[in-house]
Image (cartoon, grey):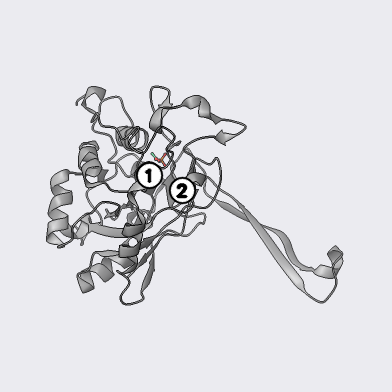
Amino acid sequence: MPGREAIPKISNWGRWGKEDEKGTANFITPEVIAAAAKLVKKGKVMCCCIPIDQVGPVFPTRTPAQRFMSILNVPVKEVGMQGSAIANDDYITMYLQGSTQWDSLAHVGYENKFYNDTPTSAVTAHGGAARNDIGKLYQSFVTRGVLLDMVRYKGCEKEGHLPKDYPITVADLDGCAQAQKVEVKSGDALCIRTGWVPYWYTLKTHDEKEAYFHAQPGVSVYTAEWIQKKEISCIAVDNIAVERLPSEIDGEFIPFHQVAIRDLGLSLGEIFIFEELAKDCAADGVYEFLWVAPPLYIPHAVGSPLNPLAIK
Ligand code: UVW
């Protein structure tokens, strides 16, 4: 297996100025947004996230979300307010990386740097990420979305997912787009269906669930140059880590994260679900849509859950 010298050496540092913290989200221009809005034809909204609950797939270094009631059927007059109303409040504790999520540009780096020459000292225990945080993208990821349905393209509909450690190649991306008669354009959100998240919900045993995280279909590290050339604004995949695991690089756990997030400034979206969208696209043959998927506005956070919508 090749070593880290095989990781593509490409970069968008400086492309949008020295101070830029948005990376490839800059490809989403006002013209791109206006054109994407015109893709809404039938008024159909499809949600592409999993529920935030205790049963979804969460990487083993993290814990599932927990929701608590903080007040329960409380008459407001008992807490000093007037009237006959009763009220409920609740709160959650969760990893910002523990459900359908965007990785911010402060999530992964290497050699002491994050995207655009940002030193690791920009992220602190007290303050979180002073640069490249997900809060900088709170108005982003409204653009044209394109679904590449790899499950269908590779003839895996019966299994419902790609083989467990399948690396999606440039030839697959081009071949799938061609088969679906859709062109990937500058500013697009590239959505890739692997079927891996729906597969999670079929697993029964602890061993099956443990193995699930260590071998998964995803994009090959060698797609990074294609992604840069296509000027994709963000990538969302229905798996755990976007990239294929185990990695194709000896001694590196997540080499695609390194080149994509740190070198290109590409926001990675994980744990999406595309089953309803894929069905709809197969039925009408239209694989493009308005994609509305901003992160939550959480200044200094290195990731965010979201409720992504594909609208046709
Ligand atoms: C993995 O779970 C491996 O990826 P991320 O840290 O981006 O969530």
Q: Is residue 275 above or below residue 112?
A: below
Q: Position of residue 247 (x, y in %)?
A: 27, 34
Q: Is residue 301 above or below residue 146?
A: above
- The answer to whether any part of residue 240 appears in the image is no
Q: In this orientation, which residue lies closer to the viewer: 5 or 17? A: 17
Quarter assignment of residue 20: top left
Inter-mark Cα distance, 1 to 2: 10 Å
Label 2 is placed on what type of residue? Leu
Q: Residues within 10 Å of mark 1 (few under 14, many from 20)?
A: many
Q: Which mark is residue 267?
A: 1
Q: Which mark is residue 137?
A: 2
Label 1 is placed on what type of residue? Ser
Q: Position of residue 175 (x, y in %)?
A: 12, 53
Q: Position of residue 296 (x, y in %)?
A: 52, 53
The C terminus sits in image quarter: bottom left
Q: Residues within 10 Å of mark 2 (few under 14, many from 20)?
A: many
Name the residue: 38% across, 44% down.
267
Picture mark count:
2
Q: Is residue 299 above or below residue 111?
A: below
Badge 2 marks a residue whose secondary structure is helix
Q: Is residue 287 above or below residue 256?
A: below
Badge 1 marks a residue whose secondary structure is strand
